[in-house]
Image: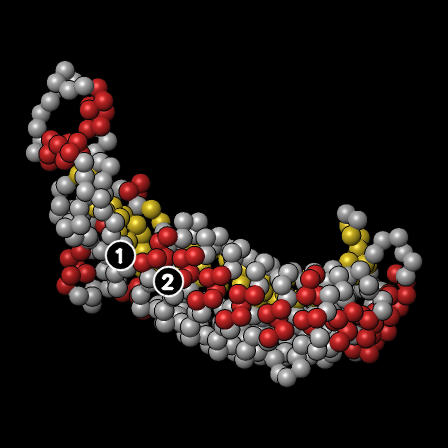
Amino acid sequence: MEEAGAAVATAGEAELNLSRLSVSPETLELELEARGEERRGAREALLRLLLPHNRLVSLPRALCSGFPHLQLLDVSGNALTALGPELLALSGLRTLLAKNNRLGGPGALPKGLAQSPLCRSLQVLNLSGNCFQEVPASLLELRALQTLSLGGNQLQSIPGEIENLQSLECLYLGGNFIKEIPPELANLPSLSYLVLCDNKIQSVPPQLSQLHSLRSLSLHNNLLTYLPREILSLVHLEELSLRGNPLVVRFVRDLTYDPPTLLELAARTIKIRNISYTPYDLPENLLRYLSLASNCPNPKCGGVYFDCCVRQIKFVDFCGKYRLPLMHYLCSPECSSPCSSASHSSTSQSESDSEDEASVAAHRMQKVLLG
């Protein structure tokens, strides 16, 4: 018992690890009371308390008095059906980990949570792997939250009031039964990571293009059949996961095209018609311009482009498991794009378009969506 519950102090921070103790909750309660008494008057405050996997059915009463400076509490993997009023005594708590319990019924969260000091202190809250069917209203008043995890619950929807969490940077709601993404989600200015995988989402609202801080958007294993064109305006987006959606058998395309300049038209003509010239025929700047010609990736086209091209997303087979949308560039809107077929049973168009995939140079492709 003493070895398992030994206090650990590192870098001016004290941690008490009482995880996976083979004792009754009553014995654990007595141990916490004793440790709390030991800490009174100690030079170093206890900041981290780890209590996972201890068969707890309620929060220990000792939390009310023995740990006034606690910043992190981990009660994951227990049998908690409610986070009682003991939680409200932890006025400086920054991180609460309560995943894989039995939370979700009436009274799962303490009354007065939204009016407590936790509303200003709590930054990380993990309630994944519980039984919540809706996002508790009191959670939407925790204005200091930066990370909220409610994955693996039974959520049916995302309330529009989610926009109240203006400090939120990471929102994890994967593994629920969510069908719609509320447009209010776009009003979270700091949101960088949004995980909505393994739900029943059928569409993405174009308003999500307003999430200018978004770097990762996980939408795999939903019911998406298309994406809004506006998704391509998320300039900081580094990862967009889409595998396991119906849309992987359809084209998602965004065509942007500005008419080529007279200079480019002339240069294209020289390249396409193989008009010969020598370094003595043209000024140095034009010679340099002609050397920048890029071949259109469509093997049936044979065209070239310089500054003016059409951006288009196409799907290519990736690891034989799913189809990966990649950005590539065409010489004109009239140039049809080759796309990789998902299987030999695809349509004749997909079969014919899958040829010469390997001929497309890697530097012509910009990865925009990752499975």
Q: Is residue 175 above or below residue 211?
A: below
**Residue 131, percent from left and from top:** 58, 79
**Residue 84, percent from left and from top:** 73, 77
Q: Is residue 263 above or below residue 3?
A: above
What type is the residue that disc 1 sits on? Arg
Of the pair 21 and 58, the residue shown nearer to us: 58
**Residue 311, percent from left and from top:** 26, 48
Q: Residue furthest top?
A: 280
Q: Is residue 19 visible?
A: no
Q: Are circles 1 and 2 on residues that touch, CB within 8 Å?
A: no
Which quarter of the figure is the N terminus placed in? bottom right
Q: How far, Cα to Cα, is label 1 from label 2?
A: 15 Å
Residue at left offset 20%, top offset 53%: 338
Which numbered circle lies on residue 206? 2
| Residue 191 located left or right of residue 353 | right
Residue at left offset 18%, top offset 36%: 261
Eye-nearest disc, 1 or 2? 2
Q: Is residue 37 visible?
A: yes
Of the pair 4 and 252, the residue shown nearer to us: 252
| Residue 231 located left or right of residue 67 | left
**Residue 85, percent from left and from top:** 75, 76
| Residue 280 located left or right of residue 64 | left
Q: Residue beneath label 1, please? A: 253
Residue at left offset 33%, top offset 46%: 366
Q: Secondary structure at mark 1?
A: loop
Q: Is residue 8 above or below residue 34?
A: above
